[in-house]
Amino acid sequence: MKKFPNAAAAVALAACASAASAETTMGIVVKIGGIPWFNAMEEGIKERAAELGVSAEMIGPTSADPALQVRAIEDLIAKGVDVIGVVPNDEAALEPVLKKAMDAGIKVVAHEGPGLNNVDWNFELASADGFGEAHAELLCEKTDEPGKYAVYVGSLTVPLHNAWADAGIKWIAENCADKLQPVGDRYGVAESVDDSRSTALDLIAANPDLRGFLAFGSQGPIGAGRAIEERRLAGKVHVMGPFSPGQGQKLLKNDVISGGFMWNPAEAGRVFVTMGNMLVNGDEITSGTEIEGLGVVEPDAATRNIITDNLLEINKSTVDELAAKGL
Amino acid sequence: MSLRDRIPAALGAETLPLLGFLGVVFLAFSLATPLFLTGANLRSMAFQMPVLGLLTLAMLVPILSGGLNLAIIYQANISGLALAWVLIQFGGPDASIGAFVLGTALAVLAGAASGAAMGAVVAYVGAHPILVSLAMMIFLRGLGEFLTRGGDISGFPEFMNVLGHGSLIGVPVPMVVFILAAILWHIMLKRSRHGFSVYMVGSNIQASEYSGIPTRRTLVLIYAISGVICAVAGLVMAARFNSVRVGHGEALLLVTVLACFLGGIDPFGGFGRVLPVAIALMILQALSSGLNLIGANQHLSTAVWGLFLIAVMALRWVGMRWRDRQRKGT
């Protein structure tokens, strides 16, 4: 019995070695598969992988459950890929399995996971404060009459969404408190159109002086927008938030969604592959390194974060172009 | 009795066809990718299966008794939270083995208590188990979200890592836990008085009652034991993720039901064994890992699971027809 694991390990090593010598392989595990945001990311990954001549695949679990991400990452380790990319649902739950990956010599790149420890680098296309403040500023600007506003996040456990919400709420409290007051706590519904819609309907019914939504999370603005459309409140209640332009194009043109900022998920997908390739080739990432898609970066070596501000404004003039790109 | 009759009689009629199916799945994937039959992949599969396996054992006995336990995921997570709470009280990463033992005891207690409460309502109030366990699931989820504010508790002592990621002479520790639990479950169902009562209650609860089987006590015990194994699953999950959150593993609930039905447990209760269910779990894991290795879409693998269940049901029907005809022929 004791001999078996050694033999198995030797076979595994041989399998890894043969895979490594052939071609760089990457696996990128995202929060959930089959939604437009991550479909766009997958396109970016495929495109960039073809340009660099590496092999990269995206794995999107069937539900946003960290347990499924752990399973997918374990399969990737078994497969012996060179790079694992991850967009975490829950940072803490992934630490042990990412440590396992790093111990196996696999490079780990994360996106939207600034608190992760077991990564080579985590990159962001938007800084948390800048992103939250940009939306808060836009909401304040659009609001005419004093009233209340509600805050959505993807889930109460997504640290990044909560950091945006914190920055946005803080900015409004400091600069716009005379016009806008928060209603209740934040709502963790914004990864689901239906939950966002029904929560928005409830909030509108309960608060006649509701003026706007700060909706962080890919489906939040769409869901809240639909609720506003149903209640014919377009122009009176404003929805701000990052959303997929193709999905929200019509709502934006009908003034149901007032606007928002985003980063390009396809670009994030491209950066995953670019950075993975750099790490495999042994390129150092230091202050002043230029990474395609991120620009010149200032990495934080202590927290392993690379934070940049590559915001894209979504408004009536940019939405068509963004939607045409397949977002 | 010929050998062809004796093997199915000893292992259960479901076992051999399922083993055959498992063989076909393994063969297909090892032909599709050289990465499938490697030590690394088999180990990875052995690390992934136990959480689902333990939860399936928790689902198995209630189904055998003609019920269902929809609360298993949240029972597991509440038990995990109980453990996490004790560990945090004793210093988080610096907590001693003693604190872990205390936490484990509290976790098992939490699982057993929530299970026994469900069992009592099913037995004495006579409510349908689906309703009762659904209510318990909603209650536990709400309670957990309230206590943790939806966040996770992390930072456990280093030795817990062994439970989640360690190996014992080459076999992953979670797998050892699952195998022990499965053997225990088999003995409980086939050799103990309680196991006999479970089958009787599942077959016909009224007849059992009139025959002097303590049906109410049996029902309470069924759900309490289901809660205990949930607690064990919760401990393994906490160790594997080094964190506890109410939502961990939500996606596994219906997969446990799927595994039970694949393993030939009668949906109406009364019939079924542990071994075929364990093989069904291996098949599901092999399908999931294999499809991941060849880079198939995750949604496709769910679809394949569904197709697979339909195929097994169809084959079972064909098998039954064939056996009937044989019997009529002789």
Image (spheres, rainbow, N blue to C red):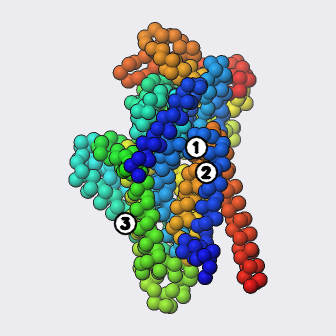
Residue A319 screen position, x and y as percent:
69, 22
> Is label 2 in a helix, a strand or a loop?
helix
Q: Please tell me which residue lies in front, B112 or A215.
A: B112
Between label 3 and label 1, give the one nearer the viewer.
1
The chain letter for the residue carrying disc 3 is: B
Residue drawn at x 47%, y 46% as measured from the top left: B43
- Does label 3 or label 1 sit earlier along the sequence? 1
Name the residue type under label 2: Phe
Residue A28 screen position, x and y as percent:
56, 32
Residue B136 sits above or below residue A257 on the image: below
Evaluate if marks 3 and 2 touch, with contact meaning CB atoms under 8 Å apart: no
Residue A151 sits above or below residue A284 on the image: below
- Does label 1 or label 2 sit earlier along the sequence? 2
| Relative horizontal placement of residue B302, taking residue B329 as reference (left or right) | left
The chain letter for the residue carrying disc 1 is: B
Tag of residue B26: 2
- Residue A96 in view (yes/no): yes
Residue identifier under label 3: B113
Residue drawn at x 36%, y 50% as measured from the top left: B168
Evaluate if marks 1 and 2 touch, with contact meaning CB atoms under 8 Å apart: yes
Residue drawn at x 35%, y 21% as measured from the top left: A302
Residue identifier under label 1: B36
> Is label 3 in a helix, a strand or a loop?
helix
- Does label 3 or label 2 sit earlier along the sequence? 2
Q: CA distance from mark 1 to mark 2?
A: 8 Å
Tally of numbered tags: 3
Residue A58 screen position, x and y as percent:
60, 33
Q: CA distance from mark 3 to mark 2?
A: 41 Å
